[in-house]
Amino acid sequence: MSSAPLLEVENLRIDLAVGGNRFAAVENVSFSIGRGETYGLVGESGCGKSITALGLIGLLRPPLSFGGGTIRFDGREIQNLPPAAMRAMRGKRIAMIFQEPMTALNPVSPVGRQIAEMFVLHEGVSWREAERRAVEALASVRVPAPERRVKDYPHQLSGGMRQRVMIAIALACNPDLLLADEPTTALDVTVQAEILDLIRDLSAAKGTAVLMISHDLGLIANMCRRVGVMYAGRIVEERVAEEVFRAPSHPYTSGLVASLPLLGARSRQGRHRLKEISGVVPPVTAFPEGCRFNPRCQRATDICRVNDPAITPLRNGGVRCHHHE
Amino acid sequence: MRFRANLVIGGALFATVVIAGLLAPWLAHTDPVLDADLMYAEEPPGSAYWFGTDAQGRDIYSRVLYGARISLTVGIVSQLINTVIGVCLGLSAGYWGGWWDDVVNGLTNLMLAIPSLVFALAIMAILSPGLTSLLIALGLTNWSFTCRLARAATLSLKSQGYVQAAKVLGYGDLRIMATQLLPNMLGPIIVIGTLGMGSAILAEAALSFLGLGIRPPFPSWGSMLSDARDQITTAPWISIFPGLAIFATVLGLNLLGDGLRDILDPQARSRRA
Amino acid sequence: MPPILKVEDLAVHFPTRGGLLGGRRSLKAVDGVDLDLKPGECLGLVGESGCGKSTLALTILGLQAPTRGHITLDGHKVGAGMDRMERARIAQMVFQDPYSSLNPRQTVRASLTAPLRLHGVTNRGEIDDRVTGMLRQVGLRPDQAERYPHEFSGGQRQRIGIARALILQPKIVVLDEPVSALDVSIRAQIINLLLELKERLGLSYLMISHDLGVVEHMSDRVAVMYLGRIVETGPWEAIFTQPRHPYTRGLIAAIPDPFRRSPAIKISGEIPNPLDPPSGCSFHPRCPFCRDICRAPSVPVLEDVGEDHAVRCRRHAELPPP
């Protein structure tokens, strides 16, 4: 195993075209993921976390487009790969799962066949062999009675089972990196716990690195070693997971942590009024000048309204703020 | 706001027809019915007769102008009747469901299975020909699309939170349909209505052409076309100009309908906001 | 103090079409629920999808007819002699999705004025005063009243939804996942607003939520539902620090802990088909503490374990402490 990270993203920019103008929906986003590591991107809707993942595997569609930066995967720059080479890489070396598996699964094909297709497509095995391995793949994602379930169509399965099938498809060819975009948001909490366990166990067993994307700070902290907090198209803070909650540095992160009604907080400390973050999340077309959090920030001063802060390195991470703690 | 070619062109075409119809007494050169002069029958278009004259020597330009009145009356009134019937049936069927929904669905399917022109023909055969009968025939036979649309819109809208909220606030069924559901489906209904006006005008032309619509000598574009059948090779202008008028009106209404669809879609509106 | 909302043995069954020979089966969405909501209290109703919590709320508000049972609102038994107008003035609802819960064709003023007129307030001055006052209460400016919903952000829309629910001055408000559709950084604003309004206006809340953090923060008492029945109910401290039912324990343990890597107790499997619920205790196929006694027919009773705490589990006394 080499010491170089599996994935290195530098100054990624993704453009959004609106009525002839281009807006940077994601800008100056840099992070790296080590082999077998689970890295978290957390942020609210519209912060750019999902399109970052799409940008990594060349799945941006108009009005979104790649706007610049380098994406180095296993030592090779992949941002300008021709579509055919990118397609070969997707599924085989980088796989992705989504929030709503129903939209990502083919409704008219049995799930076993959809898994088998991955083996045929990427490993060139026969359909017979592929179908046999599809049963194993379903068993590995802890689907009960996999030899019967392979014949089911997606609509016959529950949401949790469909997400397991998606994971089976994603991990079929043992990819090096799994992009998981809100994989449990549509699921009930007990089912979510099982899916998270599954992702954790499989990635540990197979050595798969995971990019976990969620709006749920608690979930990301629970699942990941390192976390990037995104706001308005930027990573504003990157930390070791526990520190995001214990000692947040960016005012957005600390505001968010203080605003959450965390389970157990009232039992431990009684009921406090939750800290509010004033204002609203800005749309891509109206990101503020200077630091993008400044209109909502209690620490904002004149410099924040003019100068976009650079990243200040911290122990195990960095923060993009003029007045960080 | 972005320039919308279909809306502007469609609107201009339709407005021209409306103005022509309204101002016909002032714009026309002669009386469309009475001023026949066999001395000048089948004159080609020229400076005296812009669109030429027909077999009875009537000025086609004047007759096309007056014809706009009949076509517009038929288009607007019959489509209004269709829209009211379609919305009432579709909205109530979608909202209440149950046996009433089954009845309305059956009726709609029946209407869709029989071509509306054949239906109108049958009604016209029973009633005596004339404008009123034509309005009734066309007004009763073309509501099925509006009805389907209203029903589908109601089914998707009635589970919306604001409809539930209205129920919780104590609104009665009719009030919910009138204030919560109807305003939110008006856009597509207007679009369908505009397109329906075009087909009503075509249907009028077809019925008149078959001799079951407006009776000669009153100038409807359809009856003018029907009259011109025999001279189509010798005096083509007699059929060309009423044909062009129908074409321009129906094209205008279709473009207008498409343009309105873009504007009236509330999602498109909030996306722009 | 008598409860402001009393639900007794409420059941809502939906008939479903079986096969040709299968005959009719019914889906028991709510199957014998008893509930008390005391004045000024927030009762949190938790459970996963399909547990019947939404059906229960809709039935309380009169949007769904009950199959059996009684609902008493502010001392009036629903059904005989209580019309929908009277019910509307006692109980209102705040909806989950602030985008679909406002009529896109109505200004804020129109959606607040119409209910007042409907309920017989005709004096223009009084209507204006009440609309203005209500907008201030929920943190909106009166000059925003002429705007349409699409001109507002999600959080502001939810404030409008709350204003609409409160404009008739109800005593009970059903909150259906009031913050789960909002951006995370906006949720605290709405949670704080709801708690302030409850104190200021003396409201009683029945709050449906799957977010246990929100439920713990806001509730005075909590009821946990599973497959149409309440399996545990009690004061919030008891539910969150001394949960008795294995399902409640599992729900709490399933929430990812930001400070620890792995959940403690796991509930395996998924919610069974409600058309064909398990015999005995309906939770037994997923329960880590299941024994033969749990599978035996007859549904376990909701047993009082003291201090307003009740649990529907035959083995609750034998279970290890949480």
Image (cartoon, coloured by chain):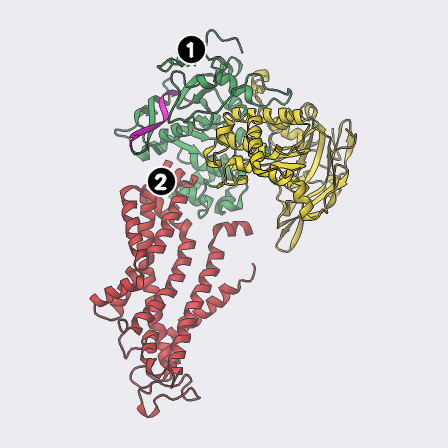
**Crowding near the residue tagged with mark 1, few <14, some 14–19, many ≥20 C-alpha atoms within 10 Å:** few
Chain shown in green: C
Residue B84 appearing in the image: no
In the picture of the structure, the residue carrying the numbered disc 1 is: C292
Q: Chain of mark 1?
A: C
Residue B259 image point, x, y percent: 48, 60
- The residue lying toward the viewer, choosing from C283 and C132, is C283
Q: SS for tag 1? A: helix
Residue furthest out toward the bottom: B39
Q: Tell me the quarter of the picture where residue B161 sits.
A: top left
Q: SS for tag 2? A: loop
Does A199 appear above or below B4? above
Q: Which residues are magenta?
A: C21-39
- The residue lying toward the viewer, choosing from A17 and B16, is A17
Does A163 appear above or below B265? above
Residue C316 appearing in the image: yes
Residue C249 image point, x, y percent: 51, 16
- The residue lying toward the viewer, choosing from A117 and C120, is A117
User: What color does chain B have in the rendering?
Assistant: red
Q: Chain of mark 2?
A: C
Q: Residue at x 47, y 34 (%)?
A: A152
**Number of numbered labels in the structure image:** 2
Residue A116 image point, x, y percent: 57, 36
Chain shown in yellow: A
**Crowding near the residue tagged with mark 2, few <14, some 14–19, many ≥20 C-alpha atoms within 10 Å:** some
In the picture of the structure, the residue carrying the numbered disc 2 is: C121
Q: Residue at x 44, y 26 (%)?
A: C205
Query: What type is the residue that disc 1 sits on?
Result: Asp
Q: Earlier in the sequence, mark 2 or mark 1?
A: 2
Query: What type is the residue that disc 2 sits on?
Result: Val
